[in-house]
Amino acid sequence: MDLEGTPTLHGCHMPAEFEPHSHCWMGWPERQDNWRDCAFHGQRVFVKVAIAISKFEPVTVCASAAQWTHARSQLPQHIRVIEMSMNDSWFRDTGPTFVIRKSKSSSGNPEQKVAGIDWNFNSWGGTDDGCYRDWSLDLLVARKILAIEMLPRFPQCMILEGGSIHVDGEGTCLTTEECLLNKNRNPDLTKEQIEHELKAYLGVKKIIWLPRGLFGDDDTNGHIDNMCCFVKPGVVILSWTDDESDPQYERSMEAFSILSNATDANGRKLQIIKLHVPGPLYMTDEEAAGIMQECEAKARLPGTRLAASYVNFYIANGGIIAPQFGDQKWDDEAVHVLSQAFPDHEVVRIEGAREIALAGGNIHCITQQQPACP
């Protein structure tokens, strides 16, 4: 059912990721021009992620008709596997952004209900700048998920991916100018107009704009979920490096300065937790050779720096599902920092998350939480 008007007109807002979930949605990778060796390695990591999350909350994995039997055989029975067409498996960006609505029940008690925003999508930049040329199936993913769950849908014509926003659930949104103001998304909208849409659809009151995302995150034009996220209201984690020779250093310092001088929607100064990036890591000749370098998708070339970030984790109900890149020093440090930032959560290491980075994202990018309805 499509709803008229904006979510805020219906009393809706986007809850924070650290608030309770009813379950998690994921896709299933298969593109041979993006996932190496016929997605064999990527699928193995997706299985690890799905199993890890399923220890904390229910998980649904969506696979194409050609891959459903294979996906079902690889995943344990307690994980739901349903058939769904898609162009690729980045459900953070193609799935719905869920919002909750407070209303009065027949008894007069407060009651929360769930709906979803169906943003427009253009493969992170359109025909010339995007990651693949045909995204017609991805345009239907959010609508299909909402139909399966029988949840109301808020259609939105503005192009926006879920990985480009992060909220604290109390009126504050983090994003980047590099992505949302990029002319390959909504060239006819001003910054003020985009802010207006975010406030109307996410139920936020304040937008904190970082100029740029993670260095090397060219696929998404600097999504916030590789750069910075909320731990709780008033506390953020920021991708960091102390290496002044690393191009990421300037971006981290720039973001740190802005965040240090910012307040959230409730006037709180932000506490900043630094989370060092791995590497730098680069695609090898062997890895690139396993990808079908065709014109339908963006080329994956040897020597390309990977947009690898430990900030790209998933917050489950009581769990932090954290990428590990095989860089022992920084892998261990990331687990330490995340354990301190989320003392009431179990940090679960996902070894081999490099495979997701090779395709252009990581754990947060392949997951989409559906909030619980208490």
Image (cartoon, helix red, strand yellow):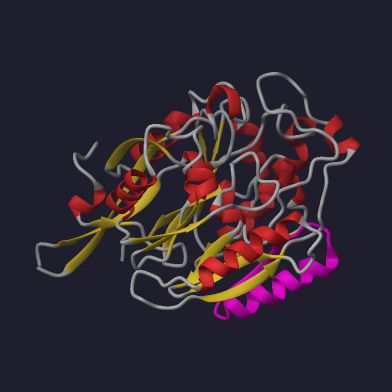
Residue under the point 48% across and 38% down: 94
Q: Is residue 25 visible?
A: no
**Is residue 334 one of those drawn in magenta?**
yes
Q: Front-most of 47 and 287? A: 287
Q: Is residue 142 visible?
A: yes
Measured as percent of width and height from the top left, residue 238 is found at 61, 66
Residue under the point 85% across and 37% down: 287
Seen as rendered, the residue at the extreme top is 295
Measured as percent of width and height from the top left, residue 177 is found at 50, 49
Measured as percent of width and height from the top left, residue 46 is found at 66, 47
Residue 109's place in the image compared with 215, above or below, is below
**Is residue 45 one of those drawn in magenta?**
no
The answer to whether 269 appears left or right of 238 in the picture is: left
Residue under the point 55% across and 46% down: 178
The quadrant holding residue 153 is: top left
The quadrant holding residue 52 is: bottom right
Measured as percent of width and height from the top left, residue 294 is found at 73, 20
Q: Quadrant of the N terminus?
A: top left
Residue 35's place in the image compared with 231, above or below, is above
Q: Front-most of 187 and 117? A: 187
Residue under the point 63% across and 55% down: 51
Residues in magenta, as a range = 324-349
